[in-house]
Amino acid sequence: GHSADALAAFRAAARLAPRDPAIAHLHARAALEAGEPSSDVFAAAARLAPQDGNVLLGQAAELLQEGRGSDGIAF
């Protein structure tokens, strides 16, 4: 129930530590859970941690949330 607060906190954390893969992933996840556009945030997280399965799952979930289910499944 505090998605907006979490998103604001992770945005601030990402500004302070832009190269931290864990913060980037949690920022993207918070954006997704808040219903905000998150494709760019997940792309940034994937650049920092290209082999992180949780980031990849998040990217697929983001595609599904955008109504691009076929793309999410293919991804």
Image: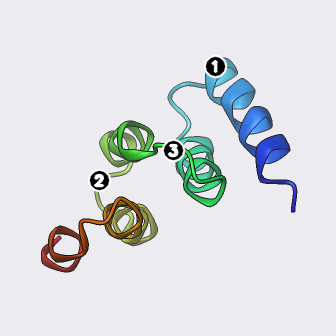
Badge 1 or badge 3: first in the primary sequence: 1
Which residue, given by chain and number where applicable, does mark 1 sit on?
15
Is label 1 in contact with label 2 (beta carbons under 8 Å)? no
- The spot of residue 46 in percent (x, y) is 34, 48
Near mark 2 (Cα within 10 A), the count class, few <14, some 14-19 or many ≥20, is: few
60 vs 73: above or below: above
Which residue, given by chain and number where applicable, does mark 2 sit on?
50
* Image point (56%, 36%), residue name: 20
Q: Which mark is residue 21?
A: 3
Q: Amino acid at mark 3?
A: Pro
Q: Secondary structure at mark 2?
A: loop
Q: Is residue 30 left or right of residue 75?
A: right
Q: Quadrant of the N terminus?
A: bottom right
- The spot of residue 3 in percent (x, y) is 77, 53
Near mark 1 (Cα within 10 A), the count class, few <14, some 14-19 or many ≥20, is: few
The alpha-carbon separation of the residues under discs 2 and 3 comes to 10 Å
Q: Amino acid at mark 2?
A: Pro
The alpha-carbon separation of the residues under discs 1 and 2 comes to 20 Å
Is label 2 in contact with label 3 (beta carbons under 8 Å)? no
- The spot of residue 32 in percent (x, y) is 55, 55
The alpha-carbon separation of the residues under discs 1 and 3 comes to 13 Å
Q: Amino acid at mark 1?
A: Arg
- The spot of residue 53 in percent (x, y) is 37, 71
Q: Which mark is residue 26?
A: none
Q: Nearer the viewer, mark 1 or mark 3?
A: 1
8 vs 75: above or below: above
